[in-house]
Image (cartoon, grey):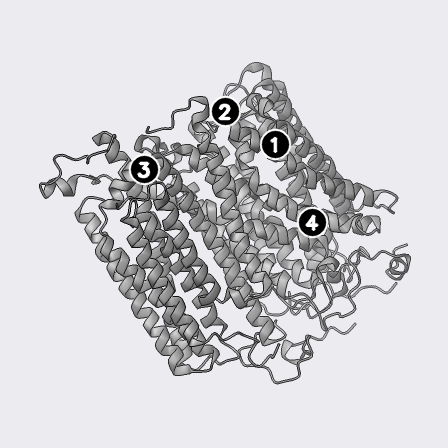
Amino acid sequence: METPVYPAHNYLTNGHGLKSWLLTKDHKRIAILYLISISAFFFLGGLFAVGIRLELTTPQGDLFQPDTYNKFFTLHGVIMVFFFLIPSVPAVLGNFLIPPMIGAKDLAFPRINLLSWYIYVVGGIFTLFAIVAGGVDTGWTFYTPYSAASSSTNVVPTALGVFISGFSSILTGLNFIVTIHRMRAPGLHWFKLPLFVWAHYATSLIQVLGTPVVAITIVMVFAERAFGFGIFDPQRGGDPVLFQHLFWFYSHPAVYIMILPALGVISEIVSTFSRKRIFGYSFVAFSSLAIAVFGFIVWAHHMFVAGITVYAAMVFSFLSFSVAIPSAVKVFNWSATLHRGSLSFEAPMLYVYGFFGLFLIGGLTGLFLATLGTDIHLHDTYFVVAHFHYIMVGGAIMGYLGGVHFWWPKMIGRMYSEFWSRISAILVFVGFNLTFFPQFVLGYMGMPRRYHMYPDEFQVLNVLSSGGAAVLGLGYLLPVIYLLYSLKYGEVAGNNPWGASGLEWRTQSPPLTENFLEVPTDIPEAYEYTPKVVREAKLV
Amino acid sequence: MSNGYAHAEGAPSMHGHDHAHHPALQHHFSTMSQQREAGVLGMWVFLLTEVLFFGGLFITYTLYRMWYYEAFALASKSIEIVPGLINTVVLIGSSLTMALSVRSAQTNQRKATVNWLIATIILGSVFLGIKVYEYALKFEHHHVPGATFDFFGHAEASGEGHEAPAEGVTMGRDQIQRTTQIFFSLYFVMTGLHALHMIVGIVILFIIAWMAHKGRFDSEYHAPVEMTGLYWHFVDIVWIFLFPLLYLVERH
Amino acid sequence: MSSGHSGVHVSPLSTYLSIFAALMVLSAITVGAAFVNLGAFNPIVALAIAGVKATLVILFFMHVKYSSRLTKLTVVLSLFFVAILFAETLMDYATRGWLNYTPMGQ
C-alpha cells in the first residue's frame, strides 16, 4: 500500500488568515466555524452541569443559593439545547458532508450558509450577555406566566438569543432541503443517497416547519414582557397552557432535530464497519421522514399534567406510541445489518455500539412517559431528566462524537490516536450510564427535578451520579486533546482510511474547495460492499 | 493523484450545455435553470416557514376569539373599517403591480419592470402610511395594550360611553377591559409583524428596482424579481386573512 | 425545457387583470357579508372568501398553477402542518367542557 501524502491544495490551505475564514462561503470552512463555536458552547453548558452535579452531591443544598441553582440548570438547558444540540450534527457534519455526498460543489446558497453561522453567533452573544448580566431562571422551557410576568431575571435577552439562533437553524434547514433537491450529481437519484442525507432532509423539514412556531411564541412572550401585552398571563385573561402547546409544537419535534441527524450518522458508520449494505435501506430512509412527521403530532405528552383535558391526553398518548415504530424500524435494521457483518471496533464504531445501548434505554423509557397513568407518577421527576438525557446525550451526542471521529480524517486529513479515542469512547459510555442510570431510580422513587435540596435517603444515588459525571466529563475532554494534537502530529489519513463506500471518500482528504476535481458520474448504489469493492479498497 | 486546484470556471459543465455562461451564473451551479430552480424552491421553503410563523398567531387568535367572543366583537367594532378596506384595495393593487413587474422581466421589458416595481413600492408605502394613521388613532383612544390601556377611555371622553357595555353583553366592565386588551394585543402583534414584513419587502423592492434599472435582469435571469414577487404576494395573503379577522367581527 | 427562457410560463396580461378584478369583487363581498347577520356563518363566509382570494393569489400571481409538483407540494405541506397545529391544539380546548372544566374567563 502506498503511503498517503498530505495534499498541498485543499480547502484548509485555500486562503489564509482570519478574514479568509470569517468571509468564507465554503461549506467546509463554515462547518469548521460551527465546530469551534458549538464546542465552546458545549463546554460552557458543561460547566453549568458541573455546578449542578456538585450542588447535588449533598442533600442540604449548601453550595449555591436556590436562585443560583435555578439559573444553573436553566443556562445548562438553554445552552445545550439551542446552542449545542440543535446545530451539532447538521451544522457541522451535515454542512461539511452533504455536498460531497451528493456530488455538489457547495450548498445551494453559500452566502446564506455563512449568514446562518453569523446569526447563530449573534444569538449566542445575546445569551452570553444574559449570563453576564446575572443569568436567567425560568428553565429552558420559558414557561409562562413565570417567564412573562414574574421572573425578574434576564428573560428577554435569553429569549431573544434563542429566537435569533432559531433563524440560523431555519436557514440551515432551508439550505439543505434545496441542496438535496437541486444539487445532486447527474444520475444520483433519491434511493442512491446515503441515509445520512435522508436523515438530514427529514431534519431540515422539522427545522423549517417547527422553528417558526417557537419564534412567534417568543415574540408574544417578548411583547408581554416588554410592552405589557396580555397573551399568556392568566391575570390578564391569557392562557399559559396555550404557551405550552405552541412551545412544544416546536420543542418536541426539536428532539428529532437533535436525534435524527445522529441516526443518519449511525447508518453510515454501521454500514462501513460491518462491510454491508444497510439492511432494508428504503425502510430506514422513510423511517426518517416518518419520525419527522410523527414528531409533529405528539407534542402534548409533555403536558399531561398541565391542565389539558383527559380526552386530548388520551389521543396524544396513543399517538406518542406511534413514534416508537419508525425508531424501532431503524434499530432493528441496524441490528440486521450488523448480523453476520465483518465487524470491527474502531473508535467511531465504539461510539455506535454505545449509542445502541443508550438509545434503546432512552427510547423504551420514553414509552413509560407516553403512558398516561405512569406519566402522572413520573412527570417532572428525575426519571424524565434521565430519559431525555439518554436520548439527547446518549443518542445525539454519541452519534455526533461517532460522526466526528468517523469523518475527522476526511475533514482534517489526519488520524487521531487510536488508543486514546477508544479510551474516550469507553469513558463516555461508562460515565454516561453512571451519571444517568441512578437518575431513573431517583425519579421513580419520587425525586423531583429542578430542586437543589433533597431528602437524605437519595444521597447515595446522587453521589453515584455526580461521580459518573466526572468520568463523563473526562471522556468529553479527551477528544479535545487528541483531536487538536492530531491537527499537526496525526498520521496522514489518506483519502479513504476506513474503506468506506460513500462518495465523500472518493475525493481527497482534506477535500478541495470544489470538493471534486471532476464530479463523479459513475455513482454506485449506496453502501456497495460487494467482495470486489472490499478487495479493491484493500480492506481484508 | 493530482492535487491541482481546479477553478470552477474551467471545469466542464455537468449537464453538458456548451453555450457560454450567463454572467449571473454562480460557480457552484451548472446551468441557469438549476440556479433559478434552486432559488425559487428556496423562496418557497422560506414561505413555508412564514406560514407556520403566522400560523402560531392565528391559532392564538382562534382560541381567544372562541373564549372571548363578545370582547372580540366589541373591540373589532371599535376599529374603523374604511382605512382597513382602503388598505385591502391598496395591497391587492400592489400585488397586481408586482405580478406585472415579474411579467415584464420575463418578457425582457426593462423599463416596464422598473416602473411596476416603483408602483409596488408606492402602494406599499401608502399601505404603511394608512397603518400609521390607524395606530395613531389607537394611541389616541387608549386602545394600545399596557399600562394606559382603557377600552372605554375614548367613548367616555367623547361623552357617549356611559351606558357601556352595550346591549346583549353579559361581561362585566373589568372583564371587558381584560379581554378586549387581549384582542388589541393580538391586533398589534399581527398587524405589527405584517407591517414589519412589508417594510422588509419595500427595502428589497428598492434593491431589486435598482438592479433592474442597472439592467441586471433579462428573460433568462430574473429570479430575484420573481422571488421578491413571491414574498410580496405572501404578505398580501396574510393581510387577506387579517382584514376579516380583525376588522369584521360581528359588524351586523 | 428551453434553457434560453428557463421554461418559464408567461401569463397573458388579461389573466392578471381579471384576477385582480375578482379579488376586488371578493373583497367587496367580504365587507358586505359582514354587515348581514348570518349567525354562525359570518366567520365561515369571511374565511371562505379569504381562502378563495388566497388561492387565486397563490395559483395565478404566484404562478403555482404552472409550477412544478414540488412547489405545489410545498404549499400543501405548509397548510397540512398548520392544520395539525390547529386540530390538535383545538382538540384540547374543544374538550375542556366535557369534564366540567370551566375555561378561564367565563
Q: Measured along the vertical axis of the image, is residue A508 above or below residue B103?
A: above
The quarter of the rendered structure image containing the N terminus of chain A is bottom right
Q: Secondary structure at mark 1?
A: helix
Given the image, on which type of amino acid does mark 1 rest? Phe
The residue shown at (31%, 51%) is C33
Question: Callout 2 environment at 10 Å: few (<14), some (14 to 19), or many (20+)?
Answer: many
| In this rendering, the label closer to the viewer, 1 or 2 | 1
Alpha carbon of mark 3 to alpha carbon of mark 2: how far? 44 Å
Closer to the chain start, of discs 2 and 4, is 4
Residue A192: x %, y % from top left: 75, 59
Alpha carbon of mark 3 to alpha carbon of mark 1: how far? 33 Å
Query: Which residue is label 3 attached to?
Result: B69
C20 sits left or right of A468 in the view: left
| In this rendering, the label closer to the viewer, 3 or 2 | 3
Given the image, on which type of amino acid does mark 2 rest? His
Query: Which residue is label 2 attached to?
Result: A452
Given the image, on which type of amino acid does mark 4 rest? Phe
Q: Secondary structure at mark 2?
A: loop
Labels 4 and 1 in the same subunit: yes
Given the image, on which type of amino acid does mark 3 rest? Tyr
| In this rendering, the label closer to the viewer, 2 or 4 | 4
The residue shown at (63%, 79%) is B9
Query: Which residue is label 1 attached to?
Result: A318
Residue B251: x %, y % from top left: 26, 46
| In this rendering, the label closer to the viewer, 4 or 3 | 3
The quarter of the rendered structure image containing the C terminus of chain A is bottom right
Question: Callout 4 environment at 10 Å: few (<14), some (14 to 19), or many (20+)?
Answer: some
